[in-house]
Image (cartoon, rainbow, N blue to C red):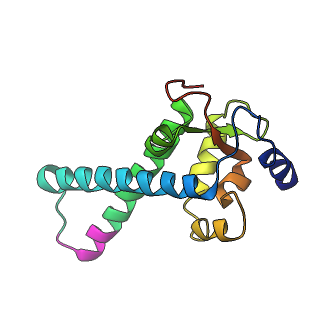
Amino acid sequence: MNDHIDSIESKTDFYGSSVNSIIRLLNFIIDTLVWLILFLSVAYVFDLYFVRFNSYIINYTYSIFLGIVIYMGYYSLLEYNFHRTLGKFLTRTKVVNANGGAITFSTILIRTVSRLIPIDIFYYLFSKTGLHDRLSNTLVIKAKSSNSLN
């Protein structure tokens, strides 16, 4: 599986060229900021109107749960429906499977859950792709055009 991804990474005329680490870092920063804004907004509304606990531990656990739900929703819904997150829209990149085809929801789910592995972000120090790319057998490539969802 990983050798297959490595061989695809070296191709430059796949749908577009494979994406370098700087673009991947930019995607990560943009998507993290979007997730943080979504999380803080939803947490504020829930705190204001719906949920108030008198226990620090319950509030902390609730916040972690809410953050993970928003995180999973953000990545899985956008990448499944558009093959892109907001960061990928802005950098004109998209997610494809290792063969260059469309990704399934189960692939996106594996990709999204794999991002929660703490060493995923550090994996880029040793590889051109993230751990979540390797585990889900996906690639991030340049899109044909910025307007296209393909």
Residue 59's place in the image compared with 111, above or below, is below
Q: Nearer the viewer, residue 85 or 73?
A: 85
For the point 67% across and 60% down, the residue is 131
Residue 141 image position (x, y, % from top left):
65, 41
Residue 103's place in the image compared with 30, above or below, is above
Count the marks: how many? Answer: 0
Residue 50 image position (x, y, % from top left):
17, 51
User: In the image as oriented, which residue stretches furthest toward the left?
Assistant: 48
User: In the image as oriented, which residue stretches furthest toward the bottom?
Assistant: 56
For the point 62% across and 28% down, the residue is 144
The quadrant the C terminus occupies is: top right
Task: Say left or right for 87 vs 20.
Answer: left
Residue 45 image position (x, y, % from top left):
18, 50
Residue 98's place in the image compared with 68, above or below, is above
Task: Say left or right for 6 vs 147.
Answer: right
For the point 22% across and 74% down, the residue is 55
Task: Say left or right for 10 vs 108.
Answer: right
Task: Say left or right for 7 vs 137.
Answer: right
Is residue 124 rendered magenta in the image?
no
Q: Which residues are magenta?
A: 54-60
Q: Please identify the dominant SS of the magenta region.
A: helix
Residue 65 image position (x, y, % from top left):
39, 59
